[in-house]
Every structure is written in structure tokens, then in C-alpha cells.
Image: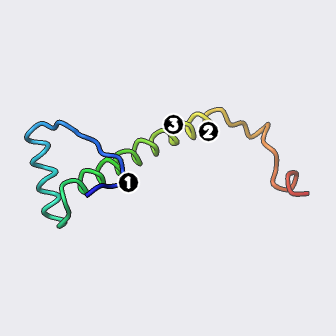
Amino acid sequence: MSTQNPRLNVVLEPHLYSLINNLAHKYGVSLSLMARDLLREALELHEDAHWQNIAKKRDESFSYKKALAHGDIWK
């Protein structure tokens, strides 16, 4: 059976494999689907942290004196 989705082989420590396997059983999904979902969640968290850092830098450089008022923008 072929698939259109790319495959990824990963070597895990036994303890990590066991944790993912236990989660897969708990949620009634395959080991592959559990690993995929955990990777997806980790990437989303990484992306959130990235955008949070950018927002923090912008917030630190924000100047109320230089900012335009709402009315000035939407005349």
C-alpha cells in the first residue's frame, strides 16, 4: 500500500518510545498518528514562541509619542 505523504524514520530512546506508545493506546490511535500529532503540536508551540519573541521586540520599541491616533489613520 503506497501513500502520497512523505515518511520519516526516527530513532527513539526506549523510554520515549514507551511514552508515545502509551499515549497512542490511551487515545486509540496508531503509533504513527500519535507521533505525527505530537510533532505537529511541538511545531505549533515553536512557532508561537517565535511570534511571541517578535511581538515582544516590537512592544519594547513602541513609542506612544510616534504612534498615530485611530482617527488620524481612518480619516
Any mark on residue 4, and which?
Answer: 1
Nearer to us of marks 3 and 1 is: 1
Earlier sequence position, callout 2 versus callout 3: 3
| Nearer to the camera, 1 or 53 | 1
- Most extreme residue toward the front, as rendered? 1
Q: Residue at x 79, y 37 (%)?
A: 66
First reached walking from the N terminus: tag 3 or tag 1: 1
Of the two numbered discs 2 and 3 in the rendering, the one whose residue sits closer to the viewer: 3
Q: Front-most of 39 and 30?
A: 30
Q: Residues within 10 Å of mark 2 (few under 14, many from 20)?
A: few
Residue closest to the far bottom = 28
Quadrant in which the C terminus appears: bottom right
Asked if labels 2 and 1 touch by Cβ distance under 8 angstroms, the answer is no
x and y, in percent, of residue 35 in the image = 24, 50
Instruction: Look at discs 1 and 2 and give the one toward the viewer.
Output: 1
- Residue at 57 percent across and 41 percent down: it is 55
Look at label 3 and name its amino acid. Answer: Asn
Q: Residue at x 51, y 36 (%)?
A: 53
Secondary structure under tag 3 reads helix
31 up-or-down from 67: above or below: below
Q: CA distance from mark 2 to mark 3?
A: 10 Å
The label shown at residue 59 is 2
Q: Is residue 57 above or below residue 51?
A: above
Q: CA distance from mark 3 to mark 1?
A: 35 Å
Residue 1: horizontal and vertical position, in percent? 25, 58
> Which three-letter amino acid code belongs to the residue tagged 2?
Asp
* Helix, strand or loop for disc 2: helix
Tag 1: amino acid: Gln
In the image, which disc is placed on residue 53?
3
Image mark for residue 38:
none
